[in-house]
Image (cartoon, rainbow, N blue to C red):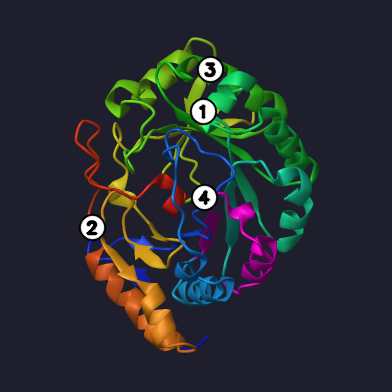
Amino acid sequence: MHDSHPEILIDRFGRTVNYLRISITDRCDFRCVYCMSEEMTFLPRAQILTLEEIYSVAQVFVELGVKKIRITGGEPLVRRGAVDLLGRLGQLEGLNELVMTTNGSQLETTARDLKQAGVKRLNISLDTLKPDKFTEMTRVGDLNKVLRGIEAARAAGFGRIKINTVVLKNRNHDEVCDLVGFALLRGLDISFIEEMPLGLIDDHDRAEAYYPSDRIKADLAKVYELVPTTDTTGGPSRYYRINGAGTRVGFISPHSHNFCASCNRVRLTAEGRLLLCLGNEHSVDLKRVLRSHPGDPDTLKKSIVAAMAIKPERHEFDLRAKPVIFRHMSVTGG
């Protein structure tokens, strides 16, 4: 601790920020249609934070009361040294939850190491159970490799593995019941996510592909009895329980059910920008602070505390407008 009295992060709307999402790379071994354009240009290595810099930022955030850190990418496991970084983060005193979002492609070989590193929970992206459609949606992915990865994560003993599914009309909206069945059979949770309008994409019209959470819920209600819960994992999901089973079904609905009033999170991009809101460009360049004040956690801490003043009240997503946000999903990992 650098301070005898740790501060906590409170923005000007009275929201306590206790959840940090860190994108450790903008690279990925998939090219999912809602996340990237087909030909992506990635950041040069020198422009992204080193693992040491990421650790320094995480350490300061935990000193400022952050209890939950989610590691994302791109695909975090394509970054060399990712598992070692997770091991160091897992030992941060005061951090309650170290969790990770992954596309599952590398889990077959890393699941056990991740568990040992102190990762508590995994969110695994899975948009379809049909191998040909999977390759179409990811452009390059192999469904069976991901399914083996999910089994490896189960075998490693992770608690509450969650499937994340982005639903696109006429692409995978007809699979929501099958995906819930898949989760039920394996004791997994699942969240359905409305597509977010981030970055220019060349694959589909977002307004046409939009499939709201309420439609998904109505589709599921024909097959399953969904019981509302007050469960929360500190993120934006609204959870329902499937009657008679442990599986929870979550809905992340940035368009139809805005969750900004309770927003408790900020994001660190791979290039070291502290993003105060996924749907706005308000940000602070922490890389500049880190590199102009190396080994000076107090200056870093002051910059983070000051950033709370520019966290906006809400996002302004509009599916019909050209994206106001030009960065792709892969830069912030959701």
Residue 24: x percent and y percent?
Answer: 53, 60
Q: Please identify, in this view, whether the residue under mark 1 or under mark 2 is nearer the observer.
A: 1
What residue is at 59 percent from the left and 17 percent from the top?
Answer: 178
Between residue 79 and residue 248, name the one nearer to us.
79
Between residue 106 and residue 43, name the one nearer to us.
43
Q: Earlier in the sequence, mark 4 or mark 2?
A: 4
Q: Residues within 10 Å of mark 4 (few under 14, many from 20)?
A: many
Q: Is residue 285 left or right of residue 106?
A: left
Residue type at tag 2: Pro
Above or below for 288 versus 321:
below
Residue ranking furthest to the top: 222
Measure the C-alpha gap from mark 1 to mark 2: 33 Å
Disc 1 + disc 4, Cβ < 8 Å:
no
Measure the C-alpha gap from mark 4 to mark 2: 25 Å
Q: Please identify, in this view, whether the residue under mark 3 or under mark 2 is nearer the observer.
A: 3
Residue type at tag 4: Gly
Mark 3 element type:
helix
Q: Which mark is residue 312?
A: 2
Q: Which mark is residue 137?
A: 1
Mark 2 element type:
loop
Q: Please identify, in this view, whether the residue under mark 4 or under mark 3 is nearer the observer.
A: 4
**Residue under pointer 4:** 74
Question: Which region of the structure is painted magenta?
Answer: 67-94
Q: Residues within 10 Å of mark 2 (few under 14, many from 20)?
A: some
**Residue under pointer 3:** 175
Measure the C-alpha gap from mark 3 to mark 2: 35 Å
Q: Earlier in the sequence, mark 3 or mark 1?
A: 1
Residue 26: x percent and y percent?
Answer: 49, 54
- Residue 81 belongs to the span the image colors magenta: yes
Q: Earlier in the sequence, mark 1 or mark 4?
A: 4
Q: Is residue 280 left or right of residue 270?
A: left
What residue is at 39 percent from the left and 19 percent from the top?
Answer: 169
